[in-house]
Image (cartoon, rainbow, N blue to C red):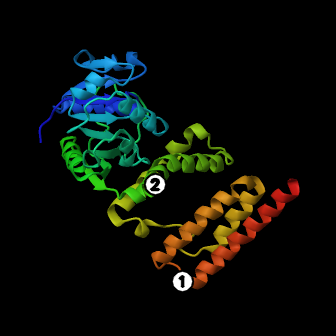
Amino acid sequence: MTRGNIYIIGCGKVGSAFAAELAQIGYKVAFITDSHTERIEQIEGADLFGTSSTVNKEFIEASQVIIVSVQDKNIRDIVHSIKGLNADLSEKFFFHTSGSETSSVFDDAGISKELSASLHPIQTFMEFSKVNNNLLKNIYFGIEGGSEAVAYAEQLVVALGSKSIIIPEDRKQLYHTACVVSSNFLVTLLNVAAEFSSSVGIEKSEMFNVFRPIIEKTISNISESGLVNSLTGPFERNDVQTISKHLDSISGELPNLIPFYTLLGMETVRVAFRKESLNMKNVISILDLMNQYVVKEQKITEALE
């Protein structure tokens, strides 16, 4: 498959990573559009890119591959802009980098289904990439779309030194939910851990340093032994007494976190049951205990209201 010109529409945290990394591995990133053109100028080798602040008809017609890398809420506006240019879109690959939207967003512009796909890096992007930071290397990409576009995307992913998984179109939202839970909710989880630890004198700024070894060892265990087999702790060993003490303490000191603890506790019970650490009698006993605190907090909330 030939490597023709690539046109990237949207040069934020994700788009800049694509621009920097694709250029470095030999793909011809010829054009970049972003409403803030000064950002494009910050990328290493920016003098080699044709740039514009709005979607450009000439850039589209001179490219083999168009990658739309804007926020999900803006993708359809970009597609509408492409449609309004009346450009020749035949024999061109169209991709977007959204984790939640599907390739069907390109349908409105009359873009071939076979040549359009979503190409989502399973990665977190905190900063704009001025140089190749290898954020797209050694990761997985979720790909969904037409067969020809998927084939091109798979080749591109291999060139980046990564792997891909094919996502069914009707499962895209669940796929993206998994991404959110794996990254965004992990940050939230550790922030809640900081809430608990700060109550015993551990500064929130020090929380991660204190708990980093147990976090990293847990991840290492998952890598070596799998998700279910890596579960340890009071839920896994049916330590109802300890769980009850947790709930008493939380109820007295941080009652707003009772729903958090009980919800995750219920899911942890399910994992422990799958591991066969708990039998059904154990499961019911722990769930009944947690439900008592859920009901109690609900009544307190209702009374306050």
Disc on the earlier residue, 1 or 2: 2
Q: Residue 204, labelled with which disc?
A: none
In the picture as drawn, the residue positioned furthest to the left comes out as 2
Instruction: Using the image as rendered, state which of residue 299 and residue 229 is in the foreground.
Output: 299
- Residue at coordinates 65% horizontally, 45% vertically from top-left? 198
Q: Which residue is mark 2?
A: 173
- Residue at coordinates 39% horizontally, 22% vertically from top-left? 54
| Mark 1 neighbour density, 10 Å: few (under 14) some (14–19) many (20 or more) | few
Is disc 2 placed on a helix, strand or loop? helix
Tag 1 near tag 2, CB within 8 Å:
no
Tell me, yes or no, if residue 153 can be seen here. yes
Instruction: Using the image as rendered, state which of residue 132 and residue 114 is in the foreground.
Output: 114
Q: Position of residue 166 (x, y in %)?
A: 30, 56
Q: Position of residue 5 (x, y in %)?
A: 19, 29
The three-letter amino acid code for the residue at tag 2 is: Gln
Q: Quadrant of the N terminus?
A: top left
Is disc 1 placed on a helix, strand or loop? loop
**Does residue 127 lie above or below 247 as drawn?**
above
Tell me, yes or no, if residue 133 can be seen here. no
Q: Nearer the viewer, mark 1 or mark 2?
A: 2
**Does residue 249 lie above or below 29 as drawn?**
below
Q: Position of residue 77 (x, y in %)?
A: 45, 33
Q: Which residue is mark 1?
A: 279
